[in-house]
Image (cartoon, helix red, strand yellow):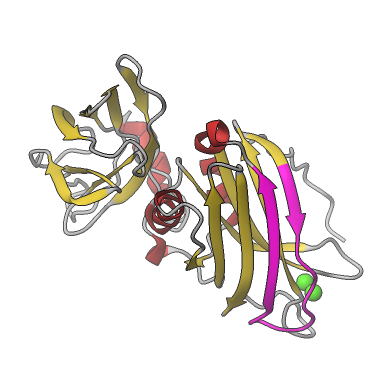
Amino acid sequence: TARRGREHRGKSPLLQQLTSPHFTLCAIPSQMKVGVKQAADLKAMDSGGTSDPYVIVYLTSDTKKKYETKVYRKTLNPVFNESFTFQVRNKNSAPWVQRQGGENGALASAGLALQAPQPWLSIWCSLLTSLQQQEQLGEVCFSLRYVPSTGKLTVVVVEARKLKRMDSRGLSDPFVKVHLILNRKKWKKRKTSVKKNTLSPYFNEVFVFEVPFNQIQNVDLVISIWDHDKVTKNEQIGKLFLGCRATGNQLRHWSDMLSNPRRPVAQWHSLQAVDVVDKALGLKTHLKLPLPTR
Ligand SMILES: [Ca+2]
Ligand SMILES: [Ca+2]
């Protein structure tokens, strides 16, 4: 385990996906018990090559109620073995847990989707490092609206700003792809028109998807921004995903949409690096063969 941790630290600090806390979840109708078992390969945050990790656990439907584990000194592989009980008042409230760990601010965070009540479920879950450390790729604003009774998910791609310049002769020619992933497989996709030579395109394009209520917890919404190129292949600028498996801002937007049915909820998001998001999504990626230069 220690060797694996060192390998991870050698990679770009932007892209590290370092930590994997171990949770158990048990849901009964009005009560949910979350056990935090252990974490492994945490990032070293202190000068001595270690961290003093602890975990914060809360439901995004009630962020006032937060639990913390004890702090474990000088370790990258803490064993917590603590459990916390939440009262779940409203069954329709955003049913997920977010979890963070670290010293002086969150080391990383992850969201967990809670499925229908079931006996103890025990999983390892990867964490993503915080957004601030990522390359500036740009920001995108879109609104989401979900109507449970009709199963209609409406995505309005509004605009983007501060996009990365992708063309040597000019700025970028951005367009947005909207993908729905169902059970980690590509399911539905749409795309906006191309806006020529701009880093702050305005789209205001509306896409409506049919997503039955019993599927909504298994769906990820992937928003990716591309630079259209006439001669060469289009280049992907950045992307992000929302859904029960998302974290941070993205998880918040998704849970705001679910807890405000029929109401559009708009939010800005920072684009993330393509490989980070693809890794988090866990989809099959194309094998990239090395090509000869020129
Ligand atoms: Ca280009
Ligand atoms: Ca271009």
Residue 145, by quadrant, is: bottom right
Residue 171, by quadrant, is: bottom right
Residues 161 and 18: in front is 161
Quarter of the image with the N terminus in it:
top left
Asked if 140 appears above or below 276 in the picture, the reply is below
Quarter of the image with the C terminus in it:
bottom right
In this rendering, position of residue 174 left or right of residue 116? right
The magenta region covers 188-210
What residue occupies the far top of the structure in this picture?
A: 119
Residue 220 shows in this picture:
yes
**Magenta-span inclusion, residue 189:** yes
Q: How far across and how far down the image is residue 247, in percent?
A: 40, 49
Asked if 6 appears above or below 30 in the picture, the reply is below
Q: What residue is rendered at 84% in x and 51% in y?
A: 292
Q: How far across and how far down the image is residue 46, in percent?
A: 18, 54
Q: How far across and how far down the image is residue 250, in percent?
A: 45, 55
Q: What residue is rendered at 82% in x and 49% in y?
A: 291
Asked if 167 appears above or below 210 in the picture, the reply is below
